[in-house]
Image (cartoon, rainbow, N blue to C red):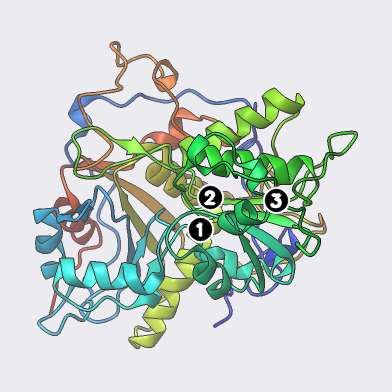
Amino acid sequence: MALGCLAHGNRAALRTWLLLPPLPVGVGQRGAPGSSSRAFSRSNCYSRLVGRACGVHQTSSPSFGFLFDIDGVLLRGRLVIPAAKKAFQKLTNSKGQFHVPVAFVTNAGNCSRDSKAKELSEALGFKVSPEWVILSHSPLRLFHQFHKKCVLVCGQGPVEENARDLGFQHVVTIEEVRKAFPLLDMVDQSRRPKELPPMPTDFPTVEGIILLGEPVRWETCLQLIIDILLSNGNPGVQLATVPYPHLPILACNMDLLWMAEAKMPRFGHGTFLVCLENIYKKMTGKELKYEALIGKPSTVTYRYAEHVIEQQMGSWGWTSPLRHLYAVGDNPMADVYGANLYNRYLQTQAKVSVTTMAAESKEQRNHNVCSAESCQSILVCTGVYSPYGDVPTDCNKSMLETVFHGHRDFHFDPSLVEASHVVHDVNDAVELVFQKENWKQE
């Protein structure tokens, strides 16, 4: 189904049915000026209804949809958060069918949609279709201009299978590079070759790099990715000068931290990106550039999620136009920032920053108006966010006093990390939305 709201695009990667309009000027651009905003306060961990309830009583055709994060909202590692089952009892009937449209939007990427859907089905007690699951790398399906290039893929789990499922036809893995050029991986002394291997003559030239998620053996991955960049795709070759601009990099999942069973957050793929960016700059004196940053808080992901919601509405025969999206998450720098950024875009229909989208050309296009009118952020207190931490001592001061955990290329704007509503858990979030929408089940 074509996405009618898809608009004026700045990159050829999105020239099919998803032409992404630009972000508001300065948003997502490194070094852009910020704006002041009322800071988080501990009292915010209670629902704040903003404005009057929207719409009239509906019984069959909803005009709103939910975008649920998974880790820290529905699950903590392998453990189900109790409020999640209560929430989905309200959202589904006895057959496990939704009363309202729902999509699961996660920054997980080291798995397939099928496996994540199966995990959710077992945890929540009803069948979750893979079509409802949006992983951090799902929008890469739209980046057709890279699908025929030879790309190096980094991550863990079924990385080659995931890359091919996304449309990439010529895939090289980190392990394949390491086996072909064993002299490049030297940190672990036990893996150093005992004899000098011959230089391979038939290894393909790498034309791009796809970072699907946090890998294992970071020292190996960091070394080989840097080697690919400095050799312009020909590992083992030393060039006289550093090639710059370097090969295109598409990175999925910018989360610095994520919440599992441990009491404190764990390193995410964003931490790996920090290492890669700083090593590259230290070695070359130049900034590492991304062709695209995908996953929350990127607007690309929310546009893709809106499309999934609209497809679901059509498949269930719901005829009311989509008006309101509610994004429920636990991470202010990913879930809240992303939802608020997309809401800002919906409100302004302004131009997208080429820093955060995939760009090849800068031509502008006429576009239709997006279906959704708003995307409200709902922050829960069951994951990364704690109402008792990272809060300025003086609530009149800006959140700039706190540590910014967002990605380097996303400018910190305090207003973008302040949630529309803060509730205790996902069940409270569902009740809040039903109250705002004056929604009652049949």
- Left or right: 194, with 425 as reference point: right
The answer to whether mark 1 and mark 2 are in CB contact below 8 A is yes
Name the image quarter holding the C terminus. bottom left
Which secondary structure lies at badge 1? helix
- Disc 1: which residue: 301
- The amino acid type found where label 3 is placed reads Pro
Tell which circle, 1 or 3, labels the residue nearer the N-terminal end: 3
Residue type for callout 2: Ser
Mark 1 vs mark 3: give the one in front: 3
* Among numbered discs 2 and 3, the one appearing first in the sequence: 3
Residue positioned most to the front: 195
Q: Residues within 10 Å of mark 1 (few under 14, many from 20)?
A: many
Q: Compute the Cα span from label 1 to label 2.
A: 6 Å
Q: Nearer the viewer, mark 2 or mark 3?
A: 3
Q: Residue 266 appears in which quarter of the rendering?
A: top left
Q: Which mark is residue 358?
A: none
Q: Which residue position holds label 3?
A: 197
Q: Position of residue 346 (x, y in %)?
A: 53, 55
Q: What amino acid is at disc 1?
A: Thr
Q: CA distance from mark 1 to mark 3?
A: 44 Å
**Residue located beneath label 2 in the image:** 298
